[in-house]
Amino acid sequence: MGRIKTKAIKRVALGIFEKEPEIVSEDFGTNKKMLGDEMSSKKVRNIVAGYLTRLKRNNKNIIE
């Protein structure tokens, strides 16, 4: 089983994903660079980037 994401992490990631889905990538490194210095800490940035990656991959599978 994986780690559980908090509501704050999900809220931030879903907000980014809904506003600008075209800039979100299926690659964790790209998402991490895209978030850059906007996040409060490195740990939060990495968790949000990972969740965005997961959302993008799952969304691609739903569309196909």
Image: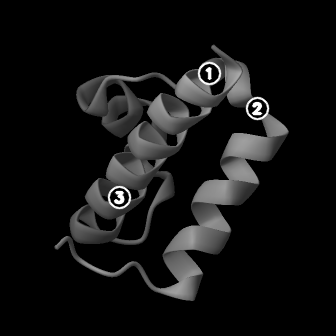
Q: Residue 13, percent across and down?
A: 58, 57
Q: Residue 52, percent across and down?
A: 48, 45
Mark 3 and mark 2 lie on one chain; the one further toward the N terminus is 2
Residue named by callout 3: 45
| Colour option used | one colour
Residue named by callout 2: 20
Residue named by callout 1: 23
- State the residue at coordinates (69%, 47%): 16
* Residue 32 drawn above or below residue 61: below
Which image quadrant for residue 40? bottom left
Dot 2 falls on a residue whose secondary structure is loop
Residue at the left extreme, as displayed: 1
Can you tell which mark lies on residue 63? none
* Residue 19 drawn above or below residue 22: below
Task: Give amino acid for label 1.
Answer: Ile
Callout 1–callout 2 Cβ contact below 8 Å: yes
